[in-house]
């Protein structure tokens, strides 16, 4: 699950680092990176959560728990990417 959740994080960090070549503050570069990747972050998260919630509708308890755990993990990863990652990147920007 960490690999799936990290995919969006990698895209956002890459776009932020690539915008390092552009003049501007860290906040402007983060806004640009979020504007560029935001739609993809939301659409992939919605698709993944929906898919794992379908798995969570299984009658088998272990499969149901797996689907629910994966859906929650991907949703939390999106929240972290939107709120926590930009703050970290802005703080530790060199």
Image: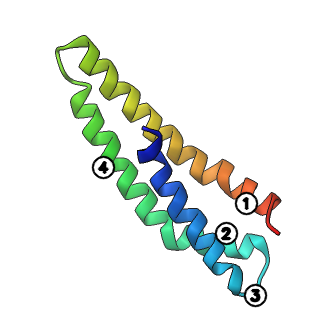
Q: Residue at x 54, y 55 (%)?
A: 9
State the separation of the CA atoms marked 3 and 2. Answer: 12 Å
Label 1, secondary structure: give it: helix
Instruction: Using the image, tell me which numbered label, if any, was put on residue 23.
Output: 3
Q: How is the image coloured?
A: rainbow
Where is residue 45 shown, x and y percent of the image? Answer: 39, 49
Within-10-Å neighbours for mark 1: few <14, some 14–19, many 20+: some
| Mark 4, residue position | 47
Does 73 sit above or below residue 37?
above
Does 20 sit above or below residue 62?
below
Mark 1 or 4, closer to the camera: 1
Lateral position of residue 70 relative to residue 85, left or right: left
Within-10-Å neighbours for mark 2: few <14, some 14–19, many 20+: many
State the separation of the CA atoms marked 2 and 4. Answer: 24 Å
| Mark 2, residue position | 30
Which label's residue is closer to the chain start, 1 or 4? 4
Lateral position of residue 56 relative to residue 78, left or right: left
Q: Residue at x 40, y 26 (%)?
A: 69
Q: Are discs 3 and 1 less than 8 Å apart at CB?
A: no
Which label's residue is closer to the chain start, 2 or 4? 2
Q: Are discs 3 and 2 less than 8 Å apart at CB?
A: no
The N terminus - image quarter:
top left
Label 3, secondary structure: give it: loop
Which label's residue is closer to the chain start, 3 or 2? 3
Where is residue 12 shown, x and y percent of the image? Answer: 56, 64
State the separation of the CA atoms marked 3 and 4. Answer: 35 Å
| Mark 1, residue position | 89
């Amino acid at each position: 699950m960490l690999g799936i959740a990290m995919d969006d994080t990698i895209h956002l960090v890459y776009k932020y680092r690539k915008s390092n070549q552009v003049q501007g503050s860290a906040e402007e570069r983060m806004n640009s990176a979020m504007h560029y990747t935001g739609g993809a972050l939301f659409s992939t998260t919605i698709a993944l959560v929906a898919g794992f919630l379908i798995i969570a509708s299984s009658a088998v308890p272990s499969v149901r728990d797996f689907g629910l755990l994966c859906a929650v993990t991907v949703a939390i990863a999106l929240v972290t990417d939107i709120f926590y990652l930009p703050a970290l990147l802005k703080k530790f920007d060199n």
